[in-house]
Image (cartoon, helix red, strand yellow):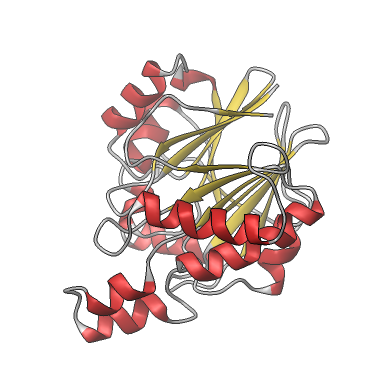
């Protein structure tokens, strides 16, 4: 049995627990070590059983608790060379943190194999992850300015996909953010809109994806019901049936205890 458990999602922090046959990993550690531990405890997960932490990039909402959590439980951290250098420079890790650069061969764990793929975002060397759990596949892709060929290749054929649906274009345009920040968010190195996300999903269903988790929603420029409806409408307009051809969830800001099983 494989499981994806969103712990935190959004601008206040991001972290996901992925498990297979009793072993587990974290993708990102964007809340304090105490909050991460409490969230895992509330879901019956002993932090000491986590085999590795995979980091998408160095922005604070993805790594706030990384150093303390990884050091406390002696968990190795895996990421790209550029992200590792940025984490070091920003002191999100220290000499005690066991860190490793992910190469093209990926990382083998007890019940999982993890590969990384490049993403387009305004960071040092951001990445997403594709996890092979003995023939079941999970892909994690947030903080995307644009869906590149590498992203499409990594997500195609996965059973479960977590994908960014960050903002509603109209809410962002009419919202209080300064012009330069709006430009950054809407750029190819910013964040994925509801529209772009939703238009990508039908093709993934055709490739075999059955479960979607919409993630990293902006609290200022989006609403869960808007993101959900945008993706649902796009999928049903493509003659795909909810709870038959696909399931659709929105990752919660804080732990909800709802896991995706597959």
| Left or right relative to 66: residue 132 | right
Compared to 211, does 60 lie above or below? below
- x and y, in percent, of residue 216 in the image: 41, 54
Compared to 251, does 180 lie above or below? below
| Left or right relative to 32: residue 53 | right
Residue lying at 70% horizontally and 42% vertically, measured from the top left: 210
**Between 211 and 112, which is closer to the camera in this rendering?**
211
Residue lying at 53% horizontally and 19% vertically, measured from the top left: 49
Residue 169 lies in quadrant: bottom left
**Between 219 and 87, which is closer to the camera in this rendering?**
219
Compared to 54, does 206 lie above or below? below
- x and y, in percent, of residue 145 in the image: 49, 73
Looking at the figure, which quarter contains the C terminus?
Answer: top right
**Between 243 and 175, which is closer to the camera in this rendering?**
243
- x and y, in percent, of residue 163 in the image: 55, 55
Residue lying at 41% horizontally and 64% vertically, measured from the top left: 86
**Residue 80 in view:** no
- x and y, in percent, of residue 103 in the image: 70, 57
Figure disc tally: 0
């Amino acid at each position: 049995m494989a499981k994806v458990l969103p712990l935190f999602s959004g601008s206040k922090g991001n972290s996901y627990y992925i498990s297979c046959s009793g072993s587990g990993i974290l993708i990102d550690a964007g809340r304090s070590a105490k909050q991460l531990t409490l969230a895992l405890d509330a879901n019956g997960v002993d932090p000491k059983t986590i085999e590795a932490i995979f980091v998408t990039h160095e922005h604070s909402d993805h790594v706030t608790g990384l150093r303390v959590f990884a050091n406390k439980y002696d968990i190795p951290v895996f990421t790209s060379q550029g992200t590792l250098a940025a984490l070091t420079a920003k002191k999100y890790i220290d000499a005690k943190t066991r860190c490793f650069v992910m190469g093209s061969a990926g990382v083998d764990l007890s019940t999982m194999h993890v590969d990384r793929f490049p993403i387009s975002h305004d960071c040092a060397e951001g990445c997403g992850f594709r996890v092979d759990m003995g023939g079941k596949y999970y892909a994690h892709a947030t903080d995307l300015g644009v869906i590149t060929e590498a992203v499409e290749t990594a997500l195609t054929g996965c059973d479960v996909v977590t994908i960014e649906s960050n903002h509603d274009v109209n809410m962002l345009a009419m919202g209080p953010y300064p012009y330069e920040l709006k430009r950054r968010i809407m750029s190819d190195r910013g964040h994925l809109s509801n529209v772009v996300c939703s238009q990508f999903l039908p093709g993934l269903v055709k490739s075999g994806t059955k479960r979607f988790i919409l993630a990293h929603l902006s609290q200022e420029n989006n609403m869960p019901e808007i993101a959900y409806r945008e993706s649902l409408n796009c999928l049903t307009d493509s003659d795909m049936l909810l709870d038959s051809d696909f399931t659709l969830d929105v990752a919660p800001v804080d732990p909800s205890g709802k896991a995706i099983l597959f």
